[in-house]
Image: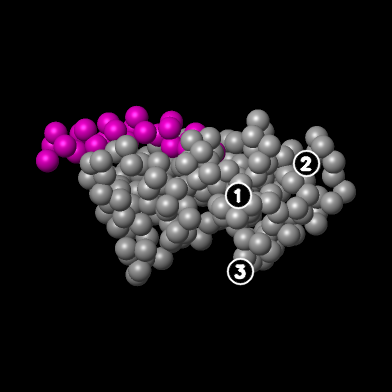
Amino acid sequence: MQLVIASRNIHKIREFRAMLKSSPNLDILTLIDFPNYQPPEETGTSFEENSLLKATHAAQALQRWVLADDSGLVIPALNGAPGVFSRRFAGANATDKENRLKLLKEMLHLQDPLRQGYFECSITLASPDGMKKTVKGTCEGTIADQERGSKGFGYDPIFVKFEYGKTFAEIEEAIKNRISHRRKALDKLLPVLETALLDKCTTS
């Protein structure tokens, strides 16, 4: 069964591929395989709305099963920022580092526990015939006062995972893929995906 990861972000694609290795009957594609496809503008006001929009749009346009996620960092002391604007926190074309530096600057005056926050991930699985399922996962931690580590992407170098005392950029990739917000959301979706795989096998 072909499954399209609705992303061109190579870091996110790599994580999904690693997490889906236990499903050998999946032929995983990404939006890189469809260079002419134009994703919809992310107009949702929540991670759930955006993941649903991306998944259903791609499923219809590509006529394939699609898995799409929308995720970001939420800081309650900043009224939920950067939130759904995590990827473009410092501007529409901002780099990951520019986003991190802006957040660190806005949090200079904050001390624990006001530096606490969480990653949130919403994942939607959608089919060409209209089936859709959305789940959510979160991962709690605190924001460091400077970048640490060279792994990961996005806000990983400043997000310190509770119980580990390390940023996501300092934690080994295999460990991060077991404890992250994306992993927690995907675990909730796997039973639905496995059912779809079984149905596909029995009808083909």
Which residue was labeled with disc 1? Answer: 169
Mark before the other along the chain sequence, 2 or 1: 2
- Between residues 142 and 74, which one lies in front from this camera angle? 142
| Number of other residues with Cα within 10 Å of mark 1, as a class: few under 14, some 14 to 19, many 20 or more | many
Q: Which mark is residue 2?
A: none
Residue positioned most to the left? 204
- The rendered magenta stretch, by its main secondary structure, is classed as helix
Q: Amino acid at mark 2?
A: Arg
Instruction: Measure the alpha-carbon separation of dots 3 and 1.
Output: 22 Å
| Number of other residues with Cα within 10 Å of mark 2, as a class: few under 14, some 14 to 19, many 20 or more | some
Q: Which mark is residue 115?
A: 2
Which residue was labeled with disc 3? Answer: 93
- Which quadrant of the figure has residue 57? bottom left
- From the image, which quarter does the C terminus lie in? top left
Q: Amino acid at mark 3?
A: Asn
Which segment did they paint magenta? 181-204
